[in-house]
Image: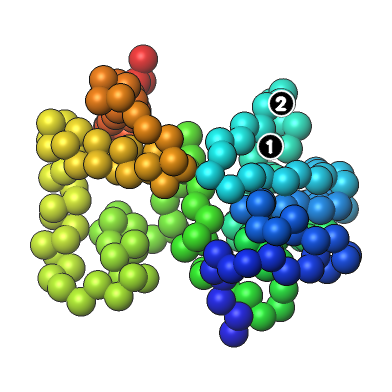
Amino acid sequence: MSTINQAGPTTHPQGRSTNGGKYAIEASSLNVFYGAFRAVKDFDLNVERQKITALIGSSGCGKSTVLRSFNRMNELIPSAHIQGAVLFHGKNIYDADVDPVEVRRHVGMVFQKPNPFPKSIYDNVLWGAKINGFKGQADERVLINTQMLENESYFERLMIQLVIGSFDKMKVRLEPESARYINKLLVKEYLAEYQGKQAW
């Protein structure tokens, strides 16, 4: 089984170089189908390392479909299949020897609305810990996580470190005031979704 890592450059399946490791993600001649319907046609994109890239387009134009193809989430839709290549740090994530779960450990997707697995609430809360080898008390872990969502100030203190850390990884330095503002927006949005309310 091949592993996904941030290795140096390799050669694209169609012979194109990954440009010395400049790009984190490269999509080449990507076509995504739902049954016979082609939702994405001949899509090419190079996403530079440590840069923020935005996909902008009208509703229904295929933005989310493209994003799902970057961590093989389209495979969870029975009628979906793809043609073309998606490289993550030079490795085609659709190669036969690549584990899609391993891909999703490196390429995440944050949804606008909650997307739970078709499991119980208990299993959904515990899922991330279980697939990462958590060996502690499951009931205690679930209780801590659910209590966190009921305590806005605690949630803010926890989230601020994640916000700063995420921007640090992109080599983007946030002023404290900006970090606090972004954090408050995220916490407000998360808690509103959890409580079934409108954030704004």
What is the crowding at mark 1: few (fewer than 14 residues within 10 Å), some, or many (at least 20)? some
Q: Which residue is depicted at the point 56% across and 76% down? A: 3
Say which amino acid is labelled 2. Answer: Gly
Q: Is residue 1 above or below residue 69?
A: below
**Residue at numbered disc 2:** 57
Task: Confirm or deny contact between disc 1 and disc 2 (CB under 8 A).
Answer: yes
Q: Position of residue 176 (x, y in %)?
A: 25, 25
Say which amino acid is labelled 1. Answer: Lys
Q: Position of residue 181 (x, y in %)?
A: 29, 21
Q: Quadrant of residue 154?
A: top left
Circle 1 SS class: helix
Asked whether the viewer can see residue 190, the reply is yes
* Identity of the residue furthest to the front in this view: 20
Q: Which mark is residue 142?
A: none
Asked whether the viewer can see residue 113, the reply is no
Is residue 184 or residue 169 the one in the foreground? 169
Quadrant of the rendering where the C terminus is positioned: top left
- The answer to whether 5 appears left or right of 170 in the picture is right
What is the crowding at mark 2: few (fewer than 14 residues within 10 Å), some, or many (at least 20)? few
The mark that comes first in sequence, 1 or 2, is 2
- The answer to whether 4 appears left or right of 105 in the picture is right
**Residue at numbered disc 1:** 63
Quadrant of the rendering where the N terminus is positioned: bottom right
Q: Which residue is depicted at the point 16% across and 43% down? A: 148
